[in-house]
C-alpha cells in the first residue's frame, strides 16, 4: 500500500500549493535572527517600523513592526478584531499598512524563559517557507510587547469545519477532506525532510492547528511547541511531554521520546477525524468508543466495518476502493509501534493518486464528487 520512496529529493524545496506535480522550489533560508546584536536593537526593544522609513524595515528577512503600527492595524487591539484565544495568547485580525490582512498573535509575557522561546520561535519561523505552512509575515518585540504576525486564513480551523458547534451542518465533502489531508501531509513532510539545517517536529499537530484558506486549501500552523531535532546521533529528542490529549503518540506520552513518527501518529488521528467525523476523545459515546484510535484500529482492516465507520455526512461521495486505501494509511500512521509507521513522504505519495482521482472525476463533471467550491482544485 505505502510505497517506500528512495528519497531523491533535494533538500529545501517545497511543492507548489496549486499543483500535484509542480516541484517549484520555494524554500528560502534566512540567517539566524539575533535579537541583541543588531544596530536596530535599542534598550531591549527592536525598532523596525516608522523610524523615518516606510514601509516598515525587514530584520534579516523578517518584517519588524512597532507596537504602534500593530495598534493601528487592529484598531487598538479592539475586541471586535479578536479571532481567537489560544494557548499562546489572544489572536487579532489586523490590516497592515500595505493593506495586507494578517492574524496578529499577542503572546503572554513569560519572563526570561519566554523571551528566549520567542527568539527561537521567530528564528525558526523565519526560516520555514512552504505553501503548506502558515507564513510568518513579521514580528514585534517593542518594549515588553511580543507579537507574531501571520498570514490570515479566512476560513478558520479544520476543527471548526469538521466538528462544528451548535449543530451546524458539516460542509466538508470527501474530495475536500482528501485534499486537506494531502496538504497537511505535505506540510509535515516539509518539516521532517526539507527543513534546513535539521528536521523539525511539529509536536502539536491537530485539527485546531490546521487552518483553511478561501479555497478550502489547508495550511499547518502553530509551531509554538515545535522543537528543532538536536540529537542527530539517536535521531530522537527526549523532553517534557507537550501536546494535546488524543493526538499524542503512545511512546511520546509514556516516555517523552519524541521523533518525527510522533507527528505521523498525530497525522493519523486527524486522518481518522476526516474519515469518521469523530473527535479524538469523546466520553459521551458508549464505552469502548471514547478514544477514537482504540475504537478505529481493529475496524480499519475490515472492509465491511470501514464502511460503517465513515462520517454519515459523506454518504455516497466516495468509492469503496478509495475508502479502503485511506483506512489503510490511517491504520499504518496510528499503529502503536513507532518504527512501523510510515514516513510522511510515504503518506504523501499514497495520497497523491487518491486526490488526483477525485480531481479527474470532478473535472469530468460528476456532481456527486463536486468539491467545496463546486469546481476542481487540484
Ligand atoms: N493565521 C490565522 N488566520 C486566521 N485565524 C487564525 C490564525 N491563527 C490563529 N487563528 C485563530 O485563532 C485561534 C487561536 O489560535 P492559536 O493561538 O494558534 O491557539 P491554539 O492553537 O492554542 O488554539 C485559532 O483557533 C484560530 O481560530
Ligand atoms: Mg494554533
Image (cartoon, grey):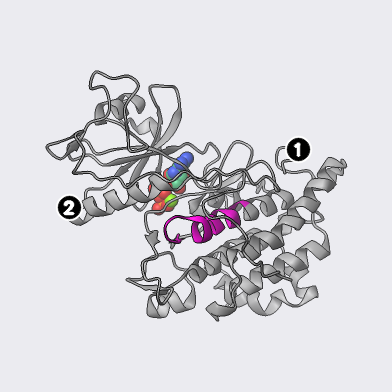
Quadrant location of the N terminus?
Answer: bottom right
Image coords of residue 50 (percent x, y): 26, 22
Q: Is residue 263 above or below residue 297?
A: above
Q: Residue at x 18, y 44 (%)?
A: 36
Residue 76 in view in this figure: no
x, y (%) of residue 43? 11, 37
Q: Which residue corresponds to the image point at 65% horizontal and 67% vertical from the top-left? A: 6
Q: Mark 2 or mark 1: name the one nearer the start of the chain.
A: 2
Q: Position of residue 296 (x, y in %)?
A: 64, 74
**Which region shows up in magenta?**
183-201
Q: Residue at x 22, y 50 (%)?
A: 115
Give residue 252's position: percent from left, percent from top. 43, 75
The quarter of the picture where residue 98 lies is: top left
Neighbourhood count class around disc 1 (C-alpha, 10 Å): few under 14, some 14–19, many 20 upward: few
Q: Quadrant of residue 64?
A: top left
Q: Which residue is mark 1?
A: 374
Amino acid at each position: 500500500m505505502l510505497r517506500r520512496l528512495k528519497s531523491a529529493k533535494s533538500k529545501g524545496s517545497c511543492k507548489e500549493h496549486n499543483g500535484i506535480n509542480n516541484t517549484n522550489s520555494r524554500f528560502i533560508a534566512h540567517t539566524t535572527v539575533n535579537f541583541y546584536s543588531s544596530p536596530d536593537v535599542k534598550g531591549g526593544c527592536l525598532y523596525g517600523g516608522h523610524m523615518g522609513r516606510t514601509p516598515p524595515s525587514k530584520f534579516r528577512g523578517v518584517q519588524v513592526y512597532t507596537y504602534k503600527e500593530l495598534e493601528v492595524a487592529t484598531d487598538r487591539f479592539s475586541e471586535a478584531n479578536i479571532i481567537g484565544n489560544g494557548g499562546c495568547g489572544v489572536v487579532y485580525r489586523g490590516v497592515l499598512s500595505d493593506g495586507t490582512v494578517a492574524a496578529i498573535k499577542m503572546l503572554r509575557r513569560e519572563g526570561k524563559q519566554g523571551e528566549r522561546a520567542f527568539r527561537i520561535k521567530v528564528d525558526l519561523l523565519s526560516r520555514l517557507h512552504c505553501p503548506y505552512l502558515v507564513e510568518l509575515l513579521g514580528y514585534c518585540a517593542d518594549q515588553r510587547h511580543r507579537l507574531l504576525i501571520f498570514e490570515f486564513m479566512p476560513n478558520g480551523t479544520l476543527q471548526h469545519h469538521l466538528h462544528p458547534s451548535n449543530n451546524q451542518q458539516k460542509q466538508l465533502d470527501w474530495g475536500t477532506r482528501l485534499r486537506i489531508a494531502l496538504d497537511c501531509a505535505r506540510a509535515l513532510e516539509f518539516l521532517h525532510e526539507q527543513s534546513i539545517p535539521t528536521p523539525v517536529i511539529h509536536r502539536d499537530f491537530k485539527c485546531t492547528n490546521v487552518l483553511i484558506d478561501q479555497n478550502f486549501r489547508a495550511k499547518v500552523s502553530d509551531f509554538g511547541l515545535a522543537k528543532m531535532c538536536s540529537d542527530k546521533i539517536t535521531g530522537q529528542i527526549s523532553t517534557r511531554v507537550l501536546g494535546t490529549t488524543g493526538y499524542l503518540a503512545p511512546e511520546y506520552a509514556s516516555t517523552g521520546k519524541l521523533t518525527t513518527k510522533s507527528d505521523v501518529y498525530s497525522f493519523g488521528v486527524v486522518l481518522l477525524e476526516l474519515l469518521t467525523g469523530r473527535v479524538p476523545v469523546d466520553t459521551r459515546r458508549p464505552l469502548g468508543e471514547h478514544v477514537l484510535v482504540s475504537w478505529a484500529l481493529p475496524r480499519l482492516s475490515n472492509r465491511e466495518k470501514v464502511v460503517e465507520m465513515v462520517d454519515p455526512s459523506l454518504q455516497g461521495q466516495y468509492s469503496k476502493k478509495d475508502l479502503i486505501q485511506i483506512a489503510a494509511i490511517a491504520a499504518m500512521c496510528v499503529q502503536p509501534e513507532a518504527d512501523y509507521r510510515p514516513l510522511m513522504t510515504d503518506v504523501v505519495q499514497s495520497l497523491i493518486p487518491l486526490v488526483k482521482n477525485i480531481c479527474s472525476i470532478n473535472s469530468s463533471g460528476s456532481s456527486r464528487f463536486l468539491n467545496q467550491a463546486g469546481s476542481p482544485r487540484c
